[in-house]
Amino acid sequence: MAHRLDRLLRPKTIAVFGGLQAAEVIRQSQKMGFAGEIWPVHPRHDEVQGLKAYRSVADLPGSPDAAFIGVNRFLTLDIVRDLRAADAGAAVCYASGFLEAGDDTEGAQLQQELVQAAGDMPIIGPNCYGLINYCDGALLWPDQHGGRRLAPDERGVAIITQSSNIAINMTMQRRGLPIAHVVTAGNQAQTGVSDMAIALIEDERVTALGLHIEAFQSAAGFEALAKRARQLRKPIVAMKVGRSAQARAATVSHTASLAGSDAASDAFLKRLGIARVHSIPSLLEALKLLHVHGPLDGNTLSSMSCSGGEASVMADAAEGRSITFPPLTTEHRAKVKATLGPLVTVANPLDYHTFIWNDEPAMTRTFTAMISGGFSLNCLVIDFPRRDRCSDVDWWTTVRGFEAALRADGAKGAIIASLPESIPEEDIMNLTVRGIAPLCGIIEALDAAEAAAFIGQAWKREPAPPVACRKAKADPDIHEHDEAQAKAVLRRHGLSVPEGSRGTNAYEAVTAAESLGYPVAIKALGIAHKSEMNAVRLNLKNAEAVRSAANELMPLGSGLYVERMVTGAVGELLVGILDDPQFGPVMTLGTGGVLVELLQDSVTLLLPSSRDEIKEALRALRMFPLLDGYRGRPKADLGAAIDAIDAIATFAVEHAGRIIELDINPLLVCGEGKGAWIADALLVTKGELK
């Protein structure tokens, strides 16, 4: 499939503008063996790096496929405009001092002018180093790097980062990760990360994609990327950093306190089937595993080592993860036991001891028996000795046994070095050619396995629909609804709200209670966190109790709200909606009540979400056993809870862009057949909701 960035990513001609940085671009491309033509452009020099220099774009012998512009920000605009007129393929804008300059209004204006100058010609940056193509040796890159040219028949991963320095650091890795492309995004003034990513995964030489993301430029762009990646079977793993706009917007609701700094971003990546890791080493190891094996078809792992200590470390490292070392069945254990001596305890992770060390046939039998259990990934923990002081001959006996066992079963395998420095780069490359994933570091290896298993599971599900977008331009006026107003809105939209009535004094409160029927709850209106202000009275069973409560509560707020008391509650949930500028309405589900912030038990979903996703989110809460009849307690009406949450989500989608905050705490979930009810609600909107 052709892409607008194809000429940039596979150039046959490169134009280079500027001084020192431009000379370095030429030097790096020559060093990497670029076979195309390079055209330096300089107003005074006749020659740059041994190549004829041209005075301007107009003097070039043709329309360049790619250009590196290494001049100041003002001259950059002129050159971009000239390149566009010359029908150039694309340009990398190296200069800084544009929108990233913060309070520099001139920089923001210049970035806008840059985009206008480029028109339909793609530009990368500004404020970036550019890109490296290790497949073709084309480098629009003004600095040194640590990568190697790939062989003509070799494939590798692609990496996009918004930080040029991080990109350089990644090229310096000695983890044996074959890299096909490195691209830096810079300001993404015109071309975003998702645009670059789609172009890269179209390259048949790219096996997997790694992203270092500081911010999502376009939700729709990433949705298109995830769709195309799934079609091409090219897995994506991301390291998302930074705080979201949602986190910076200080709000008064429990939902805002639970949403965290990047909960919406995390939910978005999960929705797309893009695995997330939290460190550069884990990103590189995940890419390596995906390069060798692709996504895993399940979450079960086996582990083998000749040390009980290593087996214990592996077991501990998997604690709390979505990947597991499942216990062996009786039959499987006996099969493995038959290959080992009587002193060996058979388990998973397996410590096979040193009794069979350097006995290749014996090791092959043991490894084959262990691997026959149908695990998604089989791990062999082995740290190679340093060659300058020791011999590693016996270690390759172990590797050959493992390789033979994997081949016999058609299984996926990884060799894990507990210390990254304990597996030389040349050995990593050797293992990769053998079809074994060589992973550096136990934690990083399990991060990689978890990422690969996540993608495998995500690809088995139907793709999620696009996130809810704003329906129309919202009224700029902010409306903060009190509980009575909020519940009236929710009730009109068919949500499960107990009957209630507003009052201004004790007489009206008693009249309302008599009409609703006892028991009732009475609350002071206009208070965000009523429990903290002692502004709620519950389970009032007669007029005198209501009158007394009303007299106590009237001085606290702007009015009274009397409501039919919900009885028989089994659990309390929080259901919250926040409007995210990138993703639309974001829903938070969590343990409700007065201890919301203390318990921090929540799951974030983007909308729309299916009933199955809502059910899965509820089951992920630590408090879910309370809803499921923990230790003989009554079971909750889970169907009603899901109905109520689904209705809240639908309401939020219908009013996307109009709801700033909706905080329902608690949603009272009663016993089976008794329903789920919105007991308190805070609502902030742009304009009135019909």
Image: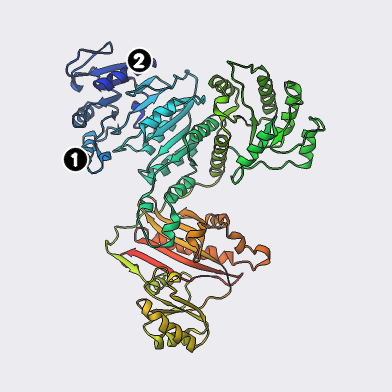
Give, as a three-letter code, the residue at label 1.
Glu
**Nearer the observer, 169 or 475:** 169
Packing grade of label 2 (10 A; few <14, some 14-19, many >=20) is: some
Where disc 1 sits, the SS reads: helix
Indicate which disc, 1 or 2, sits on the residue closer to the N terminus: 2
Pick out the residue farthest to the top: 50
What residue is drawn where x is 46% and y is 71%?
531
Q: Nearer the viewer, residue 71 or 293?
A: 71
Describe residue 327's horizontal placement relative to residue 95 as left or right. right
Q: Which residue is mark 2?
A: 30
Residue 41 at x, y percent in the picture: 22, 19
In the structure shown, which secondary structural element does the residue marked by tag 2 occupy?
A: helix
Looking at the picture, which amino acid does disc 2 mark?
Gln
Residue at point 39% right, 34% down? 161
Q: Is 564 on the left or on the right of 631, as rendered? A: left
Q: Is residue 425 positioned above or below 210 on the image?
A: above
Res. 493 visible in picture = no
Which residue is found at the position 24% from the left and 20% from the top? 19
Which of the 4 image quadrants contains residue 369? top right
> Label 1 belongs to which residue?
106
* Residue 331: image location, x then y, percent: 79, 39
Q: Position of residue 386 (x, y in %)?
A: 59, 20
Q: Badges 1 and 2: C-beta atoms under 8 Å apart? A: no
Depth check, front residue: 362 or 532: 532
Q: In the figure, 393 relative to 163: above or below?
A: above
Q: In this view of the protein, which residue sits in the foreground, 579 or 591?
A: 591
- What distance separates the C-alpha of mark 1 from that of mark 2? 37 Å
Q: Nearer the viewer, mark 1 or mark 2?
A: 1
Identify the image quadrant of residue 415: top right
